[in-house]
Amino acid sequence: MIECAGLRVERGGVTVLGGVDLVVRQGEWVAVVGPNGAGKTTLLHALAGLVPSTGTVTVAGNDPGRAARRAMSRAVALMPQRPVVPEGVSVAELVALGRTPHVPRFGTETGRDREVVEAVIERLDLSGLARRPATELSGGELQRVVLARALAQQPRVLLLDEPTSALDIGHQQQVLDLVQGMRTADGITVVAAMHDLTLAGQYGRRIVMLDGGRVVADGTPREVLRADRINEVYGARVEVLDRPGGPVVLPVGPDDAAAGEA
């Protein structure tokens, strides 16, 4: 579904991604983690064809750098970390924009398009906000609306950039459970840049860790989320607890660290 070989991205003469090799199978959920500036967002943008890159990249049978935007949008949906919201657009209208790739040129939306939009709005608990201007929403509300727009595209590949960063714990679980359910039911391939390592380990079936624009670890959550590796890559003191649902990463305070060394 996704294949990258020697993927490189440079900006202003600075290498942001340096030779990423990655294969993601259909229906996989791959969580991309790494410290700030590691290249997580740039990787998603390269997969979506939004930034120039070199190397070989194929996403859902398309070359992101050469495929028509309409063809890419039918197959790939990106939920950006910082969405641009047009003035005066309601929540329902913003979600409906996700159907644009499926509407014929000079055509109008069909009953099927409206059904998809209504179903996504209901599943993301947005019915009470449907008529509100999107620019008046809180950060967490807008995050759910932007995810709804991406899901309304009915993509084969869903790219999520920090999908829960502005959400409370309840809506974090709701949103990720919804994505997980759609992945299981529809075979959607999910690649999600995730800041929270515990959530990455609980929902991602595989974790790719970036540092300095390169892949430094790729494997199951238990293989990648080790305390020594997190300390090395993030410079953080953590304890990793093994739980049935996946590793739980806990920060360790200075007093706890000192006690452990005594």
Image (tube, grey):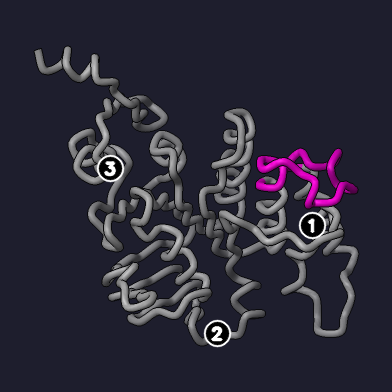
Task: Decide: few, some or many residues near mark 1? Use Cα within 10 Å; few <14, some 14-19, many ≥20.
Answer: some
Query: Does label 2 or label 1 sit earlier along the sequence?
Result: 2
Q: CA distance from mark 2 to mark 3?
A: 36 Å
Horizontally, is 50 left or right of 89 in the view?
A: left
What kind of element bears circle 2?
Answer: loop
- The kind of residue tagged 2 is Ala
Query: What range is drawn magenta here?
Result: 123-143
Within the image, what quadrant is residue 144 found in? top right
Front of the two marks 2 and 1: 2
CB under 8 Å between discs 1 and 3:
no
Which residue is identified by label 1? 116
Query: What is the quadrant of the C terminus in the image?
Result: top left
- Looking at the image, which residue is at 89% across and 75% down? 108
> Is residue 66 shown left or right of residue 116?
left
Q: Position of residue 231 (x, y in %)?
A: 22, 37
Q: Quadrant of residue 226?
A: top left
Secondary structure, mark 3, is helix
**Residue 209 is covered by the magenta coloring:** no
Residue 132 in the image, given as x and y percentages of width and height: 87, 47
Residue in the image at 17% along x and 16% along y: 258
- Residue bearing mark 3: 234
Give the Cα distance between marks 1 and 3. Answer: 41 Å
Asked if residue 62 is positioned above or below residue 124 in the image, the reply reads below
Image quadrant containing the N terminus: bottom left
**Rendered location of residue 16, percent (x, y):** 34, 68
Identify the residue under disc 2. Answer: 67
- Of tags 2 and 3, which is closer to the observer? 3
